[in-house]
Image: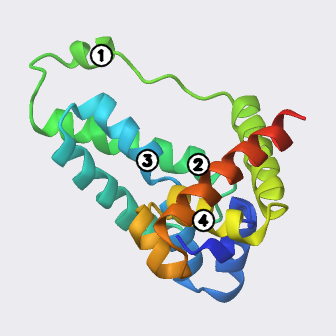
Amino acid sequence: MATDYLHINDEDLLARFYTDGNKEWLGILLERYTMLLFGVCMKYLKEEDTARDTVQQVFLKALSEIPKYRIDNIGGWLYRVAKNMCLSLLRDKKIWSEPERLDQMEQPEEVPLSLLLEREKDIDRLKEELSRLKDEQRICLTLFYLDKKSYQEVATLTGYDVKLVKSHIQNGKRNLRMRLEG
């Protein structure tokens, strides 16, 4: 994920897409939901490869459907699409011989809107506090945790020694924790 867009919330990304039609905004948005959708698909399908394929299908559907309709709650919409695709896949595979058994399947918990809003506030606060760290710490933390780079990759990208990268990450985590708790 491009770190330049971490400060933009989901609604603003959608608004930008609806304004200029640039699918890069959708790409950034969908990347944010990859792990959540994968978790939903795993809960239903119980097979990692099938779950990954289904997440890709959700993304393809999103890329084709979002431009056609105005979506207010992208997280909820993506969740419903993923859930419906999983249920459809399970029906097509005839995992259940009786339709009633589908209703008996353990359902993932619906996330209350208040919890989603609280999570969004926490993410906004985390981004704000992250931006207040020293540049070296912020850059190393972002590359390591958000961009999933290894210590060596962070060192290569920043020009820092690997030991210095580890130090910046450790100090950055400590400072971020203190800021968030304080």
Q: CA distance from mark 1 to mark 4?
A: 43 Å
Q: Which residue is mark 2?
A: 75
Q: Which residue is mark 4?
A: 140
Q: Which residue is mark 1?
A: 105
| CB within 8 Å, label 1 to label 3 | no
Q: Earlier in the sequence, mark 3 or mark 4?
A: 3
Query: Which of the 4 image quadrants contains residue 140?
Result: bottom right
Q: Relative to the observer, which residue lies in front, 13 or 62?
A: 13
Label 4 CA crowd tier, 10 Å (few <14, some 14–19, many 20+)? many
Q: Secondary structure at mark 1?
A: loop
Mark sitting on residue 169: none
Q: Secondary structure at mark 4?
A: helix
Q: CA distance from mark 2 to mark 3?
A: 12 Å
In front of the other: label 1 or label 4?
4
Residue 136 against residue 124 in the figure, above or below: below
Residue 36 against residue 27 in the figure, above or below: above
